[in-house]
Image: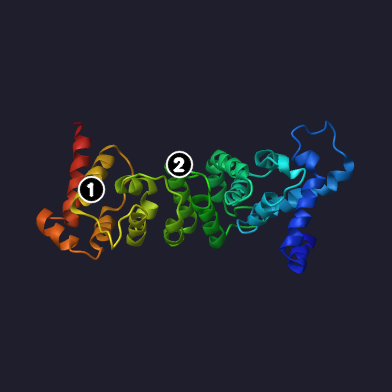
Amino acid sequence: MFVLQLSDQHGLETYLHFLRRLIAAAAARVISPNPPASWDTSTVLTYRLLVQETQRLARDPFLADRFRDAIDKADSEPFRHFELGRFVDRVGLSALERLIIASSMLSATNRRDLVQQAVVLIRQNIDQARQTLMAHPTFESGNINQSQAAKLLSNILCESSSETPVLDPTQRQNLLSTMSSKYGPDFVASAMKQIIPRLNMQPGPSLAQTLVQFGPEVTSDVELVRALMTRIGITDADPPTDLQVLETINRLARYAFDGSPMPDIRVLVRAFNSFVSPFSSRFSRSHGFLETDVVYRMSLFNGIKQSGF
């Protein structure tokens, strides 16, 4: 309660100063690579307060940004030697708490090494964190609400200054599936509409590969499919060509043959046909581009696979 009052009454900078003082006072326990064999009893209460406050920040993706600012903007000892993995081990954070703290660190601006440490920590804890996220309640203090969950998704999928996405396609798809199971598909659709324009994506994948990588949680909504198309250069100003559509459908059919999770093909067709261009009617006339035709192609590939050829 005292810490909350300190932040509310004296502003964020005062709170950040307090948090840094708390960490510095317990540095032997939480920062030093070679902790002493026995602890100074005078630091016991300080350490307990630090643990409690870190847990409070690590259970709310919005509050976790304060931890990032306290560490990233500190340029004095002992923070020059701050190691994120060591710190979360020493204060005993759970996998989900580690994920939340690390995701806030992805947008650190002063210390690039903190970003890389955060990426490693997220990849190490993402699977166990997803299991904790599904619990009711998430923490003994309560659930992560939808606003906090959307912030966590945004932090992980958008904020990294890393050259590559933090999560690989399978990890990302599993996280979206967990969010959909916990909060519902409408939540994921709403959150991803805000995230996709800022999404940290690997350059170069085809539209078919992108759709498969994001899975049904994202590709069952026309607006989201169009947003993904925009990210790879398909827009109203530069609509899909006949060749792009044929290549996409053929590649998806091959992915289906290999057993990859498929996007909603009818949604994809509607997304293609939503572009303002002479493409839709021209393609429909010359190639018979109908939903039933595309679904038939996908079914044919699946039939060939099941027959053993």
Residue 259 place in picture, x, y as percent: 30, 39
- Disc 1: which residue: 249
Q: Residue furthest left?
A: 286
The residue drawn where x is 54% and y is 58% is 151
Mark 1 neighbour density, 10 Å: few (under 14) some (14–19) many (20 or more): many
Q: Residue 257: where, in percent of width, then height? A: 25, 38
Residue at (19%, 34%) from the top-left corner? 307
The residue shown at (80%, 39%) is 28
Q: Earlier in the sequence, mark 2 or mark 1?
A: 2
Please, which colouring scheme is shown? rainbow
State if disc 1 and disc 2 touch (CB < 8 Å).
no
User: Circle 1 — which element?
Assistant: helix
Residue furthest to the right in view is 42
Image quarter where the C terminus lies is: top left
Q: Residues within 10 Å of mark 2 (few under 14, many from 20)?
A: few
Q: Name which residue type carries label 1.
A: Ile
Q: Is residue 140 visible?
A: no
Q: Residue 66: horizontal and vertical position, in percent?
A: 67, 56
Identify the disc placed on residue 114.
none
Q: Position of residue 63 (x, y in %)?
A: 65, 58
| Dot 2 amino acid type | Asp
At mark 2, the secondary structure is loop
Q: Is residue 236 left or right of residue 187?
A: left
| Residue 171 visible in the snapshot | yes
Question: Residue at 76% across / 46% down in the picture?
Answer: 76
Residue bearing the label numbered 2? 168
Comparing 143 with 260, the one in front is 260
**Above or below — where is 57 with respect to 47?**
below
- For residue 188, which quarter of the picture? bottom left
Calculate the distance from the C-alpha at mark 2 to the C-alpha at mark 1.
24 Å
